[in-house]
Amino acid sequence: MMARLLQERVAFFTIVRKEIRRFMRIWVQTITPPAINAILYMLIFGGLIGSRIREMDGVPYMDFIVPGVIMMGIIINSYANVSSSMFSAKMQHYIEELVVAPVSNITILMGFIIGGVARGLAVGTLVTCVALFFTDLSPQYPLITLSIALLTSVMFSLGGFLNALFANTFDDISIVPNFVLTPLTYFGGIFYSISLLPEFWQTVSKLNPVLYMINGFRFGILGASDIPLWQSYAVILLFIAALGSVCLWLLHRGAGIKQ
């Protein structure tokens, strides 16, 4: 029993170390661009447009958009890290060695997920540091802020793993971020409060899961949200449970791996 636990532990930390080294070796491509994008968002939306809007939900417009910009970086990079890494593992056929090794599927999955979380939180931290040059923010509820960021990163890392299992080319990896994640984040209340929308579009917006993550994170930082906090946690945990279960089931079947 102890030998098996030690074996799982070694396998887990080996995968995590590989995943972190992978994106840190090319940090100019993986960590820096989101920070540059954040600067552009804050200059254009927070600076130019914000000077006319001034306030949103009773807070300065720059303060309002910062949580959404940070969360966007976490979402996209958590997803991108796992999807690209897992797809590379498929194409180079070393995922097959992991699957046939005496290592549980949950250990393999968690190793990739922690790698995605590490990149997502690294980007989130860097974007937060950049944001401090534009506004003086301090989280009202640090534990809520950190837990929402962590859970969201786990959720989208699982989504990236699922995407990679079904992808056959690198084009398949880029479809979801470009045509699904980006629209969902833009319509997730980053730059506006859904209270400004007509009632019908408020209802439609509530079908967007990203809305709950951004508003939960915003509540942790500003203490204000369009969505009750419990709903944010409920949606995130529900998606984590569903995506995690599907990923483990597909790994067990060898879907997308065994030819």
Image (cartoon, grey):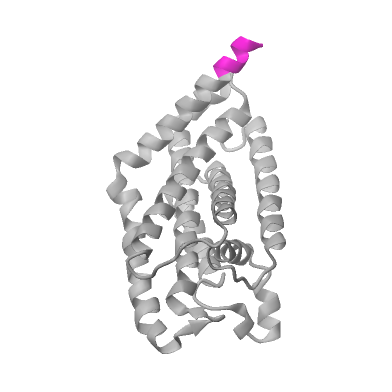
Closer to us: 247 or 21: 21
Q: Position of 28 compared to 172: left or right?
A: left
> Is residue 8 shown above or below 124?
above
Residue 227's x, y, as percent?
67, 69
* Residue 218, visible in the rendered structure: yes
Closer to us: 14 or 170: 14
Q: Main secondary structure of the magenta part?
A: helix
Q: Looking at the image, how many numbered discs can be counted on the residues? A: 0
Q: Residue at x 66, y 81 (%)?
A: 201
Residue 103's x, y, as percent?
58, 21
* Residue 101, visible in the rendered structure: no
Stretch of the chain drawn in magenta: 1-7
Residue 34's x, y, as percent?
36, 58
> Is residue 256 shown above or below 131?
above
Name the residue furthest left: 28
Q: Residue at x 61, y 14 (%)?
A: 4
